Image (cartoon, helix red, strand yellow):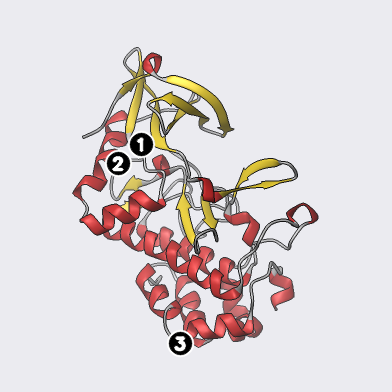
């Protein structure tokens, strides 16, 4: 059941991040948790947030373990004067952060999609094989979420984390933006620029639009290219040669609304013989899409 709390009963400590919807604080009580406090102008559907919080309890044990390990899933609502003003969640594990230019920062997906910059010199970027396994981990998460009736909705370079520490692994933030299929979102969010489904109406989020964004995520991660799309794969023989026959066919399907491949189709391609193509032909060291063509 949802573990609700009153704002005044929480012990606020460090201010960790500010975003478009709220501010995140580390808490002294309860220990090991963080608070996302919404800005005053953010409308929260407390009932929908409660349903989202309770959802993992209805998953199989294996699915629940994966969701718990790879997401900052909300664990409780926070109220003040009867109004839902925030949520509780666990902080991203320390291995999903690093130090760059003398300060701590999260290992966001964006580091893997742009050419290496001078300030990233100390950052270990993944090899082609490691990129493949990071893609596999993201795909497994999406497969579990979709199978349990969850639409991710806003997919971006900022709310997906990665690490190589202890082996390739991934972690998702801003899970309050997820929604249960065919239900309204607890907190309405807009698509991140460059990550929208061109066939969807603004603000809409469906499994089909998720599958388009999952194609963006997979292809961009494998190629190290922040702007490449399934439509680019359709028009570029060079990109198709780099991806190989099976992945290219999936990308072409992703360009067709209603026919987009599910996560398990990408998983099958990446864990089969096609993984060798990616590892051999394109090491994923941060080249741009133009360099890959």
User: Which circle's residue, 1 or 3, is located before the other in the chain?
Assistant: 1
Instruction: Report the front residue among 253 and 144.
Output: 144
Q: Are dots 1 and 3 in contact, CB under 8 Å? A: no
Badge 2 is on which residue? 52
Q: Quadrant of residue 223?
A: bottom right
* Callout 2 secondary element: helix
Badge 3 is on which residue? 273
Point out residue 26 in the picture as x, y percentages from the top left corner: 49, 29
> Would residue 230 be seen by someone viewing this image from the given angle?
no
User: Which circle's residue, 2 or 1, is located before the other in the chain?
Assistant: 2
Task: Identify the residue shown where x is 58% and y is 56%.
Answer: 109
Task: Identify the residue shown where x is 48% and y is 48%.
Answer: 202
Point out residue 272 in the picture as x, y percentages from the top left corner: 42, 83
* Callout 1 secondary element: loop
Q: Name the side, left or right, on which 49 lies relative to 108.
A: left
Q: Nearer the viewer, mark 2 or mark 1?
A: 2
Q: Are dots 2 and 1 in contact, CB under 8 Å? A: yes
Point out residue 38 in the picture as x, y percentages from the top left corner: 47, 27
Badge 1 is on which residue? 186
Task: Identify the residue shown where x is 46% and y is 50%.
Answer: 172
Q: Categorize mark 3 by other alpha carbons within 10 Å: few (<14), some (14-19), many (20+).
A: few
Question: Measured along the vertical axis of the image, is residue 85 above or below residue 233?
Answer: above
Q: Name the side, left or right, on which 120 lies relative to 213.
A: right
Q: Categorize mark 2 by other alpha carbons within 10 Å: few (<14), some (14-19), many (20+).
A: many
Q: Name the side, left or right, on which 270 lies relative to 283.
A: left
Q: Quadrant of the N terminus?
A: top left
Cα separation between marks 2 and 3: 37 Å
Q: Name the side, left or right, on which 98 lies relative to 161.
A: right
Task: Identify the residue shown where x is 63% and y is 84%.
Answer: 281
Point out residue 142 in the picture as x, y percentages from the top left corner: 38, 60
Cα separation between marks 2 and 1: 8 Å
């Amino acid at each position: 059941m949802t573990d609700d709390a009153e704002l005044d009963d929480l012990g606020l400590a460090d201010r960790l991040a500010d975003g478009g919807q709220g501010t995140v604080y580390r808490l002294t009580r309860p220990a090991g948790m963080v608070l996302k406090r919404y800005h005053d102008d953010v409308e929260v559907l407390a009932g929908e947030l409660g349903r989202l919080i309770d959802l993992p309890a209805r998953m199989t044990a294996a699915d629940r373990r994966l969701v718990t390990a790879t997401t900052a899933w909300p664990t409780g609502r926070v109220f003040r004067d009867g109004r839902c003003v925030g949520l509780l969640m666990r902080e991203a594990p320390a291995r999903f952060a690093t130090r760059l230019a003398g300060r701590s920062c999260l290992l966001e997906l964006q580091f893997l999609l742009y050419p290496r910059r001078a300030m990233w010199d100390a950052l270990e970027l993944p090899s082609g094989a490691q990129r493949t396994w990071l893609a596999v981990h993201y795909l497994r998460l999406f497969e579990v979420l979709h199978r349990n009736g969850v639409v991710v909705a806003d997919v971006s370079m900022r709310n997906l984390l990665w690490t190589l520490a202890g082996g390739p692994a991934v972690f998702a933030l801003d899970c309050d933006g997820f929604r249960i299929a065919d239900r309204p979102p607890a907190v309405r969010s807009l698509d991140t620029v460059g990550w929208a489904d061109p066939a969807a109406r603004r603000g809409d989020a469906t499994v089909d639009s998720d599958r388009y964004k999952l194609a963006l995520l997979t292809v961009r991660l494998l190629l190290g290219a922040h702007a490449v799309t399934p439509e680019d794969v359709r028009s570029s023989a060079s990109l198709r040669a780099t991806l190989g026959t099976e992945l290219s066919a999936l990308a072409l399907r992703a360009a067709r609304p209603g026919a987009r491949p599910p996560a398990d189709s990408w998983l099958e391609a990446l864990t089969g013989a096609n993984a060798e193509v990616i590892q051999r032909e394109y090491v994923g060291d941060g080249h741009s899409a133009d360099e890959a063509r």
